[in-house]
Image: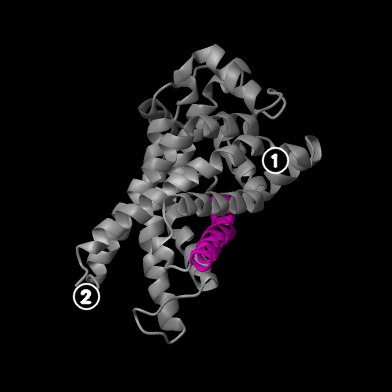
Amino acid sequence: MPPHPVVQAIIDLSAGAIGGAACVFSGQPLDTAKVKMQTFPTLYRGFVHCLVSTYKQVGMRGLYRGTTPALMANIAENSVLFMSYGFCQQVIRFAAGLHREAVLSDMQKACAGSVASIFSSLVLCPTELVKCRLQAMHEMETSGRIAKSHNTVWSVVKSIMRNEGPQGFFQGLTTTIAREVPGYFCFFGAYELCRTGFADYMQCDKDDIGVAPIVFSGGFGGACLWLVVYPMDCVKSRIQVMSMTGKQAGFFKTFMTIARSEGVRALYSGLTPTMVRTFPANGALFLGYEASRKLMMKQFDS
C-alpha cells in the first residue's frame, strides 16, 4: 500500500537532501568558477584560466570555498523542491480530476516541478547569497570594492545581519524565482522525457532503466535548465555579490546595465564550466534522489 501523505513527504524530503549533497560534492569547483566568471567577466580568459588562477592564489581550498553554504543551499533547496514536487503532483492530479495514484504525463510533471521551485527559492536564496559572496570574496577585496574580506560562513552571515538586516539575505529573490520557475519546467520536463525515451527503447518501466540512463537524463535536464535561464542566473550572482558594496539595483536595471556596458556576451560568462558541471552534478542529484527514494518506498510495498 502507498505510504501516508506525511510519510511520503518525509521520504521525498530525505531523498531530495541526499541528492542535493551528491550534487555539491560532484561539482563544487566548477560552480566556484561559474560565480567568479559571472561576477568578474573580464578578469578570466576562460574557465580553465579561472580554475588555475584560483588554485595559484588560494590553493585547493579556494576551489571549494562556499562548500558549506552550497551544501546547505542544495540540501535545503532540493529537499524542499522534491517534497513540493510530490505535493504539486497531487495538486495537478486533483485539478485534472485524476485519482491519487494516476501516472502523470511528462508535461504535467514539468508543470509540477515549475510550481515547486517557487517554494524552494525561499530557502535557496539566503544560502546561495552567502555561497556566492564567499566564492567571489578574493576578487572583491583585490579589486578594492571592499576593505576587508570574510573567509567563513559565520563572518559573512554576521556582516549581512549587521549591514543589511534580515532582509539582506533575500537580495536577488525576485531574480531567483524568475530563474527557477521556467528553469525547473525545462529541468523536470527534459529529465522525464529523457527517462521515457530510455524506457521505451529498453522496453521497461521508467524506474528500472538503470544507473547510466538516470545519470544521463539528470545531466540532460540540467543542461536544458541552464541554457534557458543562464542570463538570469548571471544577474542574480551579480546582485548578490555586488550588494556587499551597498544597495544594488534590481533585476531589470542590473540586466540592462550588464547588456549595455559589457555586452550580451557578459550575461553568458561562466557558461562553459556550468555545462561541464551539469552532467556529473545533476546526474548525481537524480541518482541520489531516485536510488534513496526507491529504497525508502520499498518499505511500504505490500
| Mark nearer the viewer, 1 or 2 | 2
Q: Most extreme residue toward the bottom, as rendered?
A: 97
Element on which disc 2 rests? loop
Q: Is residue 182 above or below residue 261?
A: below
Q: Is residue 102 above or below residue 34?
A: below
Q: Within 10 angstroms of label 1, few (less than 14), some, or many (20 or more) residues?
A: many
The kind of residue tagged 1 is Tyr
- Residue range of the region highlighted in magenta in the rendering: 174-202
Left/right of residue 195 with respect to residue 276 in the rendered view: left
Is residue 252 a member of the stretch shown in magenta?
no
Element on which disc 1 rests? helix
- Comparing 36 with 151, the one in front is 36
Left/right of residue 170 with respect to residue 207 in the rendered view: right
- Comparing 136 with 289, the one in front is 289
- The residue tagged 1 is 268
Determine the CA span between mark 1 and mark 2: 48 Å
- The residue tagged 2 is 1
The image position of residue 5, as x and y in percent, is: 26, 70
Q: Residue at x 49, y 24 (%)?
A: 63
Is residue 198 a member of the stretch shown in magenta?
yes
- Comparing 88 with 291, the one in front is 291
Labels in figure, total? 2
The image position of residue 262, as x and y in percent, is: 78, 35
Q: Earlier in the sequence, mark 1 or mark 2?
A: 2
